[in-house]
Amino acid sequence: MANTPQSKKRARQNERRFAVNKARRSRIRTYLRKVEEAIASGDQQAALTALRAAQPELMRGVTKGLVHKNTAARKMSRLSARVKAIA
């Protein structure tokens, strides 16, 4: 348990950051799920639209420190390859 004023403040800050990061992570997952669903439906146009919407969201996660740069690049690469394969 936090005892000093500084540790109490850090605990408050950690709670706040956790809530913000959780919301961001959830938002990224939602965008990625929309791409997955569009790929599963076989609609290339919808998948392409969803992929274009997901890309900036995923890259924003990189700049905010939620996702590693290489992880985001790998996800985008694999998704775009699957969207391309629909045709």
Image: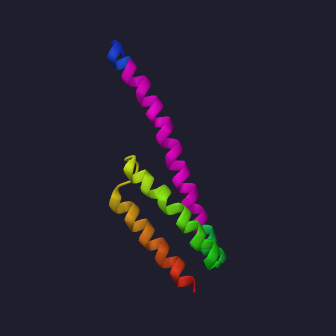
Is residue 77 visible from the viewing direction of this image? yes
Q: Is residue 76 left or right of residue 68?
A: right
In the rendered view of the protein, which quadrant contains the C terminus? Answer: bottom right
> Which quadrant does the N terminus fall into?
top left
Q: Position of residue 12 (x, y in %)?
A: 44, 23
Q: Within the image, what quadrant is residue 6 found in? A: top left
* Looking at the image, residue 25 lies above or below residue 19: below
Please provide percent x and percent y for residue 52. 53, 66
**Which residue is situated farthest in the top direction here?**
4
- 30 shown above or below 79: above
Residue 23 part of the magenta segment: yes
Residue range corresponding to the magenta coloring: 9-35
Helix, strand or loop for the magenta stretch, by majority: helix
Name which residue lies at 50% across and 46% down: 24
Residue visible at 58% across and 56% down in the picture = 30
Query: Between residues 53 and 80, which one lies in front from this camera angle?
Result: 53
Residue 1 visible to an observer of this rendering: no
Locate residue 81, reporting x and y percent.
47, 78
Residue at position x 55%, y 62% from top? 53
In the rendered view, would you say 21 is above or below 62? above
